[in-house]
Amino acid sequence: MRLTHLLSRCVLAVALAAVLAPAASSFASIVLVRAGQARSVIVVPPEADRYEKEAADELALHLRRMSGADVPIVTDGAGRDGMARILVGRAATAVVADLGVGRALGERVDEMSSRDGFVTRAGGDVVALAGARPPGTAYAAFDLLERLGCRWFFPGDLGTVVPRRRTVTIEPFETVQRPSFDLRSMWVCGFGGENLNRDDRDAIEKWRHRNRQSYDYEWNAGHNMQDTTAESLAQPEQVDVVARRILADFEREPQRQWYSLGWNDNYCHVSAVQAMGIVHPWYPLPQATDPLVRFYNAVVEKVEPTHPGKKYGFLAYMDYLPAPVTVRPHPSLVPVVAPIEQCPRHVPLGGECWQRDALLEAIRAWCRVSDRVLIYDYEPGFLIDGGVPVPCVTRMRHEYPLWHEAGVRGLYAQVQMTVMNNGPNLYVRQRLAWDIDADVDRAMTEYFGMLFGPAVTHVRKWWNALEHMMHHGRGHQHEDEIMKIVYPIDKVRRLEQHVRAAERRADAEPFRQRVRMIRFSQDNLMLYLQMRKAEDEARFADAAGLAERIWKLREQVEAFNPYFYKIGDLDRTNEHASFLSRGWAKHNASRAALIDGSAGDLVAMTGDAWSFRKDPHDVGVARGWYALDAAPGEWRSMRTSQIWETQGLEDATGRGYDGAGWYLTHVDVPGRFAGRRILLSFAGVYGQMLIWVNGRFVHHRPWNGPWWRIAYHAIEDVDVTMAIETGRRNTLMIRVHNEAEWGGIYRRVFLYAPAE
Ligand SMILES: [Zn+2]
């Protein structure tokens, strides 16, 4: 199976080559439109299918936009002397008998192989374009329009570039194309799921298809098994329960080819099923892949005898991202590797990001046990980056060829429509999905040059500077929490010069409107960084105000152009999510209330920098460090507004320090708080905590999981009344023990007296 698979990859690579082979008589340009008058007809078969119709309609639409000419769509191209003919789909294969669309199919490997290849031949007075299978015909039309200069950089008219010319000609050519990835798709949504109205959805679908993303590639690997739990794996009868449900669904929909065995979205923590005790490489939880794949195999084996040939997708996600070790997936299973919690900012094989290296190895391992591996490559702008720019062109151009080489069959992405922050990502993602050898530099030059015209230099400088920070900044992972490190506020402030220069240059439409997206993105990022700075400086009321301004700006952006920044459902409604602007506002307002007299009075704000020392062998408790004002050994300064990884506790490959670390500070407590209840307030600590005040133990908080479980609900107030001494200096000592990933105190700590 593996050998066949490798051979098929070679065929794919060769089949992408374009050759020019017109007949000797057909070297002349083909005139489609002359001086605004149609000099061609578009010919479709009498009973055109949806792809032939779409190809014809799109050709007519764009030729009209280019030249003003109405090129007619006809079903009979004969008897139109002097007119060129654009033959579409079966109209082409009927006339040009040797078109050879079979060449675009390549060596058919299995039922997942792409049906999207096409052949186009232009020569004489004929342009013949046809897919090897129906969808390919539409892609052939889009390819032809691209040759005529059309681009679809983002959805809607503002993202579309159609060159204006009165005369439209095309030089003779022939191309045979087949996509590099059989599946190319993206789910455009916001936080909280779908947030698109019908117009948005139509515009996005058009944009996707024009960029040769898959049409109806029927696939399914979502979280379909909502009623199952981790414990299900330990219950053999659950195999029958799930199999029965699938059989019933197939009874109802016999034509259905795909079925989702995706686990529900509670991360499937199968601690109850530690079959082998293999620990997941990214965090200290058992790797769940083997028991899960065994479960899936058992289900498929029950269903296959009566329903052969169906496919079953499942997300290789979270605890089951690594490939199975002791079992191979059933050939009908389609693993969809979904790296959600891995750092998406760096490239593999560069020695700079162990997470990306490990992910590449995991994908290769999956491809060794399955020849149907798909990747669910989350667009970082969808992940929780606070709605700030997340350039990742550098990563994609390095990583996608490696995935392709490993044997990955498809690229799927979950994205937020926020082209002001991720437009180039989305465009390059689509280019590489179709052709892994696509010229990314050229794609970027086209993106910026055609969209921004006279402002190109400055817009591109702005984006490149962000991409550089994204790629080289300290810290790993994608979370909101780290973006203030990735984007130093002073550096981002200096980018204002590029935005202003772009605004000056873009003195005409549509460039002026397009440059607005850069303005919005820059303003949004600056507000975000100012809010983070206010939090770091314990100016919580200011931070809440800035969060409100972010929200107002986003509403303004969405009203200006819904694709610049599409507000997600969750962003709009969920005030509790502290990673979204409404959540930031609420979080900071509640912090402010604890110290401004409304819900409490500030007793003492501890400094941002505390003393810190590592305790790699975890001897500090046994030696009683907490009892001493200055435990022996080296102490250094450590900010309490950032995780410790970004303050030197991380090696060159991005592996953070895991283990114990001691934080120490002194704080004056005014005498007027005598007799009042005093709480020590934390809004963010990764890891287990032991807390001493003046050498007296006051609290233990157990380790509560990796960062992605706790990042947004880490607020904890500890009553320290019994240990605090008013009217004098107090010592606070906190031992943090971090099991994995990020560690340490990352939000400012203070003492307050709650209102009575
Ligand atoms: Zn990284």
Image (spheres, rainbow, N blue to C red):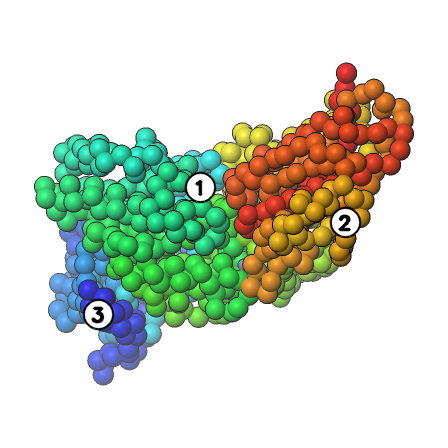
Q: Amino acid at mark 2?
A: Ala
Element on which disc 3 rests = helix
Q: Amino acid at mark 1?
A: Cys
Element on which disc 2 rests = loop
Query: In the image, residue 716 lies at what x, y percent?
Result: 65, 32
Residue at 34% across, 61% down: 365
Is the CB of mark 2 within 8 Å of ligand 1?
no
Q: Earlier in the sequence, mark 3 or mark 1?
A: 3
Residue at 34% across, 66% down: 406
Question: Is 511 placed left or right of 205 in the picture?
Answer: right
Element on which disc 1 rests = loop
Q: Which mark is residue 189?
A: 1
Query: In the image, residue 360 lies at what x, y percent?
Result: 41, 62
Q: Amino acid at mark 3?
A: Leu
Q: Which mark is residue 3?
A: 3
Q: Give the class, few, some or many, for how many residues have Cα within 10 Å of label 2's Cα (few <14, many ≥20).
A: some
As measured in the structure, the alpha-carbon distance from the residue carrying label 3 to the one carrying label 1 is 38 Å
Question: Is 647 placed left or right of 326 in the picture?
Answer: right
Q: Earlier in the sequence, mark 3 or mark 2?
A: 3
As measured in the structure, the alpha-carbon distance from the residue carrying label 3 to the one carrying label 2 is 62 Å
Is residue 720 something that shows in the picture?
A: yes
